[in-house]
Image: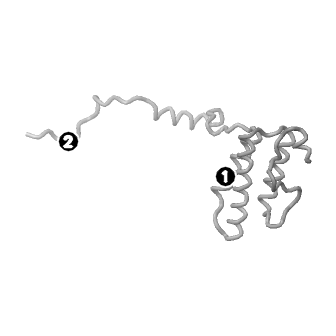
């Protein structure tokens, strides 16, 4: 019986939980597995985080397979990075306006200025 089961929690990877690099496991999957296990060791993952961990592992497998076949894997890599950040508890700061430079923020504010449509110049000549 594993330590996780004795502690009353479910094993992180289920029946196929690897303890070391396994045959067929690519370098990305190995790195993701080790990262997730480290996150889990720091603070045990809840059920939804465990599901996210499985998705991370699947994405890593797809990235390894894509690299082997010479496919572009940028989208999968971005998704994997985002999901690993979520497992680590790193907040997504993309929507945080504090990281946007002041001149860019002012440019966005210009686009929010209401315009008056009744004062627009008529360019078409009136029909007789």
In x, y percent, where is residue 86? 71, 41
Q: How many marks?
A: 2
Locate residue 71 relative to residue 106 in the image: left or right. Answer: right
In x, y percent, where is residue 122? 23, 37
Locate residue 105 relative to residue 85 in the image: left or right. Answer: left
Name, please, the residue furthest toward the left. 128
Q: Nearer the viewer, residue 63 or 128?
A: 63
Crowd band around label 1 with a 10 angstrom C-alpha radius: few (<14), some (14–19), many (20+)? few
Disc 1 marks which residue? 78
Q: Nearer the viewer, residue 45 or 90?
A: 45
Name the residue: 23% across, 40% down. 123
Mark 2 → mark 1, Cα distance in angstroms? 50 Å
Locate residue 103 relative to residue 66 in the image: left or right. Answer: left
Name the residue: 44% across, 30% down. 113
Name the residue: 66% across, 61% down. 73
In x, y percent, where is residue 52? 71, 46
Crowd band around label 2 with a 10 angstrom C-alpha radius: few (<14), some (14–19), many (20+)? few
Q: Nearer the viewer, residue 16 or 39?
A: 16
Q: Quadrant of residue 62?
A: bottom right
Q: Nearer the viewer, residue 115 or 4?
A: 4
Q: Nearer the viewer, mark 2 or mark 1?
A: 1
In x, y percent, where is residue 18? 85, 56
The quarter of the image holding the C terminus is top left
Q: Earlier in the sequence, mark 2 or mark 1?
A: 1
**SS at badge 2:** loop
Name, please, the residue furthest toward the bottom. 69
Name the residue: 92% across, 48% down. 1
Name, please, the residue furthest toward the front. 1
2 and 1 marks in contact (CB < 8 Å)? no
Disc 2 marks which residue? 124
Labelled disc at residue 11: none
**SS at badge 1:** helix
């Amino acid at each position: 019986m594993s330590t996780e089961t004795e502690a009353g929690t479910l094993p992180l990877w289920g029946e196929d939980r690897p303890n070391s690099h396994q045959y067929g496991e690519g370098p990305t999957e190995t790195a993701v597995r080790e990262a997730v296990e480290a996150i889990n060791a720091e603070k045990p993952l809840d059920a939804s985080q465990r599901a996210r961990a499985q998705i991370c592992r699947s994405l890593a497998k797809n990235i390894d397979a894509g690299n082997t076949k010479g496919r572009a894997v940028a989208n999968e890599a971005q998704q994997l990075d985002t999901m690993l950040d979520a497992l680590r508890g790193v907040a997504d700061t993309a929507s945080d306006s504090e990281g946007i430079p002041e001149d860019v923020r002012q440019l966005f504010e210009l686009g929010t200025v209401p315009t008056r449509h009744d004062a627009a110049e008529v360019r078409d000549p009136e029909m007789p």
